[in-house]
Image (cartoon, grey):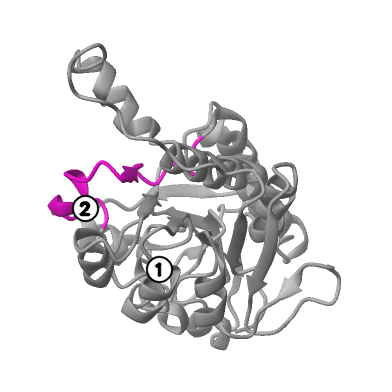
Amino acid sequence: MTNKKPTLIQLVTIAHHDTDAQLAKHYNVVQLKNGPEHDATIAKVRADVEVMVTSATQPTSADLIDQFPNLKAICSFGVGYDSLDVKHAQKKGIQVSNTPDVLNDCVADHAFGLLLATARRLGHADRFVRDNLWGSDQRFPLGVKVSHKKLGIVGLGRIGMAIAQRAAGFDMDIRYHNRTPRSETNLTYEPSLHALAEWADFLVIATVGGPSTRGLIDAEVLKALGPKGIIINISRGSVIDEDALVQALQEGVLGGAGLDVYENEPKVPDALKTMDNVLLAPHIASATVETRIAMAELVFSNVDAFAATGKVITPIPTL
């Protein structure tokens, strides 16, 4: 008689050539999809589920977690966890893992790409050429120099540090704001977010999402950054007061914005789409072939490690 495999419930599809085989190695894999079969699927397997695979953008609430009384581990695809009730899971003794480090370079590359493209108006320039305006009576506006400028980083974690490394190559003056200063860096710590914005030419948001940072970048911070200042966001849309951002851009209080994330994705305020000093990307900071493969493989490694040892290898710290 063969032992029955424990059940793994998968909330998201992970694009990897060996996904099914990797997950099925140790588990009976069940896909949980939105639709008429959603509740029936949960009812059928709820007592058997020991592992859940989710993602940084997939809502994974306390109510959903509680549907599975024997759940022991949650493995998330992505580094952020504001959509996942980690604290609730940890209180129940459920291990929660994410995929840190493997996406640092690509997210930092993207942040700096947004910074360069926004400063030099590359999105506007592309449209200018495509609309056959080059050579017409309409002149393309001048951009803003990046080298030797002042860069403020909000959130000097792994990704923030990688952004700072790239900025150093452009001879930028770098300061950062965190809840507490980091002892392992020589970068200048600014305890006041408002003062950092007032000092900076560019402000890059690289902090965590969730309730603790919701609306952190408010109208006053945007006003402090000023009419020549540019804000870049590759963290979470909730960190910026989006209404205040739109108003600041419309009124010329803020110079420009490069955005990869939004408050109510995939919805983007229509006003932002009309502005030539705003560059918009569809939440693609980690979206490279190499990084997505590495993220998928780390999810599988966490699943495999839990099956073999009862411990995930990249646990989220206790909240």
Q: Which residue is mark 2?
A: 268
Q: Position of residue 235 (x, y in %)?
A: 48, 60
Observer able to see residue 113: yes
Residue 98, can we see it? no
Q: Characterize the magenta stretch by its predominant secondary structure.
A: loop
- Near-viewer residue (180 or 80): 180
Q: Which residue in the protein does label 1 denote?
A: 83
- Residue at figure coordinates x 50%, y 48% from the top left: 28
- The residue that appears at 57% across and 58% down in the rendered structure is 79
Instruction: Report which quarter residue 302 is drawn in.
Output: bottom right
In the image, farthest residue toward the bottom: 91
Query: Where the C terminus falls, by quadrant?
Result: bottom right
Label 1 sits on a secondary structure element that is loop
Please tell me which residue is depicted at 32% across the width and 23% down the height of the picture.
126
Q: Amino acid at mark 1?
A: Ser
Callout 2 secondary element: loop
In the image, residue 273 above or below residue 138: below
Q: Amino acid at mark 2?
A: Val
Q: Would you say residue 281 sits in the magenta stretch?
A: yes
| Label 1 or label 2, whichever comes before in sequence order | 1
Residue 223 - label: none
Mark 2, other Cα within 10 Å: few <14 / some 14–19 / many ≥20: some
Query: Is residue 28 covered in magenta?
Result: no
Q: In the rendered image of this protein, does residue 142 appear above or below residue 84?
A: above
Magenta-highlighted residues: 265-287
| Between 263 and 134, the one nearer to me in the picture | 134
316 sits to left or right of 244: right
Mark 1, residues whose alpha carbon is within 10 Å: few (<14), some, or many (≥20)? Answer: some
